Amino acid sequence: MSIRPSPLTLRLLGLWLAGAIAASWWPALTPLWIASGAALLACMLVDALLLVRSAGVDVERTVAPSIAVGVWSPVALRIRPAWRRGFRAEIFDDAPSSMSLRGQPRAVRVPQGDASAMEIRYHVLPT
């Protein structure tokens, strides 16, 4: 699992950097800049802790019993979180080197309390 900052976090860090520049010009803003940095850090740590402590995501892959060589075959993925909160993610599936994949990485949004389905395609390469 990789943890990456959200666009909102990056914007808030940008604002905090702008606050650092302002505080360097107007030293009276320094306590406000330090307090906002501490609050931002606390929020990011709580968010990261909740992410790490949360249950995983169940992914079910449905593939045809046999896949023809040289033909693109659909593979259905159903993503269901173990928690009730919705989330966004990028989905990457893996396949043996004798196959190529189409339709990934794919951004997926899973609504709160629900599951999301998507389809990718496998192609078995002729040997």
Image (cartoon, grey):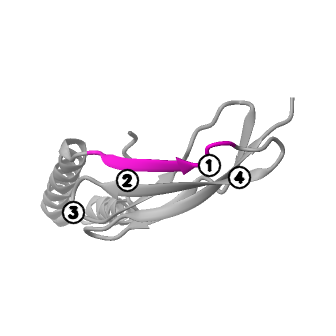
Say the numbered circle drawn on residue 73: 4
Looking at the rendered image, the quarter that the N terminus falls into is top left
Q: Quadrant of residue 33?
A: bottom left
Q: Earlier in the sequence, mark 4 or mark 3?
A: 4
Given this view, does label 2 or label 3 mark the residue nearer the observer?
3
Disc 2 to disc 3, C-alpha distance: 21 Å
What percent of the width, then of the height, locates residue 24? 29, 58
Give amino acid for label 4.
Ser
Give amino acid for label 1.
Ala
Say the numbered circle drawn on residue 64: 1
SS category of the residue bearing label 4: strand
Instruction: Say whether marks 2 and 3 touch (CB < 8 Å).
Output: no
Looking at the rendered image, the quarter that the C terminus falls into is top right
Q: Earlier in the sequence, mark 1 or mark 3?
A: 1
Given this view, does label 4 or label 3 mark the residue nearer the observer?
4
Judge by depth and name the residue closer to the eye, 86 or 71.
71
What percent of the width, then of the height, locates residue 41? 20, 51
- Of all residues, the one furthest to the right in this rendering is 127
What percent of the width, then of the height, locates residue 62? 52, 50
Membership of 87 in magenta stretch: no
Say the numbered circle drawn on residue 84: 3
Q: Earlier in the sequence, mark 4 or mark 1?
A: 1
Instruction: Say whether marks 1 and 3 touch (CB < 8 Å).
Output: no
